[in-house]
Amino acid sequence: MSRTPPRRAPAPAGALAPQAPLSKDSHLAAEIKRLVAVGERDTARERYGELVASQQRRAVRIAYQYLRDAHDADEAVQDAFVKVFTHITSYREDLPFEVWFTRILVNACLDLRKSRSRRLRWAVPMSATNEVAPAEPAAPDPSPEQRLVSSERATEITAAVDSLPDRQRTVFTLCHVAEQTTAEVSQALGLSEATVRVHLFRAVRKLRRLLDRA
Amino acid sequence: MLDAVSSAEQEHLSTCGRCDARRVSMQRLLEEVSETAHVDADAAFPLERLNRQQARILARLQHEGRPARVIAFPAGHAPHEPIGSRTRPASRWIAAAAVGGLVVGVIAGRFGHDYSFQRAGINRVIASRTVEQPELRAPVTTGGIREVAASISDDEFLDQLESAIDAPAAAALQPLDDLTPLAWEVR
């Protein structure tokens, strides 16, 4: 089985047909596109802020699951949102915005992973440079519930998901972390729905084998 | 998390405890995995960080599509005499001299190159004629150009070659020679 992650694969013809009524965000994206087209960029940018706020949580969950690094996830999400606005005129209003955005986000994550591995190959040891990344303020103390989840079991789960082959991991992340349907994932990744289901089935089977306590 | 159960599947699950238990356990596992992923990401990205991220995105978009702002070079520390007026004629002369030198060098090289080839051609002609007409043999050495012996045996040639190789100036080329494969090695 190929371990190559899905990368800008062209979607099969007709695969992008909407299967459900378009979401509020899709309508908002279409409106932003119209505003940009008539040259009202400032208004479009204001409206885009609403779209960012609506999609941001889901985006950071996907990116963090994919990259496992808060700084990289932050960068990938920012890049994806900037790219979406820059190319908003190419958005097709008859399609769900979430699918289009997810596709751009996954590509941004892949780009970042590639540049991260290149960086690691040529990186100067930290002791040799004086540059230190600005520290993000620490998250507030976790609640007892969060502490409970971030226990050994959480580590096991994270390790199990990380051990999945790239494509299975992407499909699993989009289905179970981003909570997209297999049809949406197939549209976002440009794979057939049957292929998505096969990857999902294999991912779940492997996770069960690794995580089942019984 | 799991797909919706069809009526036939539902019917089976209601009668098969094993499959039902399996489905419930899988459902629980997937919920656990998703919950862990959400908690991890949400802990790494608290609300204030999301707000900051949103502000950065909008700030980046603010500059998107606009030309970069060019900052003027500070003029406050200009000396009394402008630097340009003092150095410009000198640098112009230097540049002109460099170009002139380059042109002269190229032309001289070109002529020298052609001349040596012409001399070699003349030598070859003379050598061939001296073989045919020994009375024409005369020294043709001109400043700096060695006369090529018309008749040189293989032994003489190899002697000259070996003595040239043994010369101290050739020692510097020895590492290169070591790196170069021999003719019979590359066959």
Image (cartoon, helix red, strand yellow):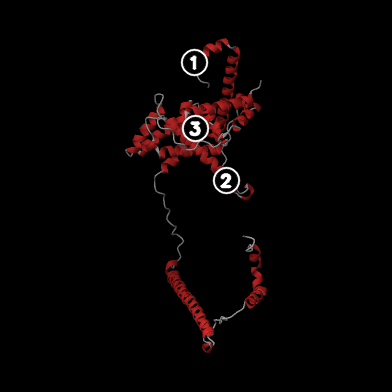
Front-most of B120 and A73? B120
Viewport quadrant of the N terminus of chain A: top right
Q: Are the two marked residues, 1 and 2, in contact with CB atoms closer than 8 angstroms?
A: no
Q: Which residue is mark 1?
A: B6
Closer mark to the observer between disc 3 and disc 1: 1
* Mark 2 belongs to chain: A
Closer mark to the observer between disc 2 and disc 3: 2
Residue B119, relative to residue A200: is it above or below? below
Amino acid found under the numbered disc labelled 2: Arg
Which residue is at the far left? A38
Q: Which residue is mark 2?
A: A119
The quarter of the picture where residue A64 lies is top right
Q: Going from the N terminus, do you reach mark 2 or mark 3 first?
A: 3
Amino acid found under the numbered disc labelled 1: Ser
Q: Image point 41% across, 43% down: which residue?
A: B64
* Mark 3 belongs to chain: A
Q: Give the crowd class for mark 1: few <14, some 14-19, many >=20 residues within 10 Å.
A: few
Viewport quadrant of the C terminus of chain A: top right
Q: Which residue is mark 3?
A: A59
* Mark 1 belongs to chain: B
Q: Quick check: A66 left or right of A89?
A: right
Answer yes or no: are tags 1 and 2 on the same subunit. Answer: no
Q: Give the crowd class for mark 2: few <14, some 14-19, many >=20 residues within 10 Å.
A: few
Which secondary structure, mark 3? helix
The location of residue A200, given as percent across then percent down, is 54, 27
Q: Image point 54% across, 83% down: which residue?
A: B131
The location of residue A149, given as percent across then percent down, is 62, 25
Residue B161, relative to residue B79: is it above or below? below
Amino acid found under the numbered disc labelled 3: Ala
The location of residue A202, given as percent across then percent down, is 57, 27
- The residues tagged by marks 1 and 2 sit, at their Cα atoms, a distance apart of 50 Å
Which secondary structure, mark 2? helix
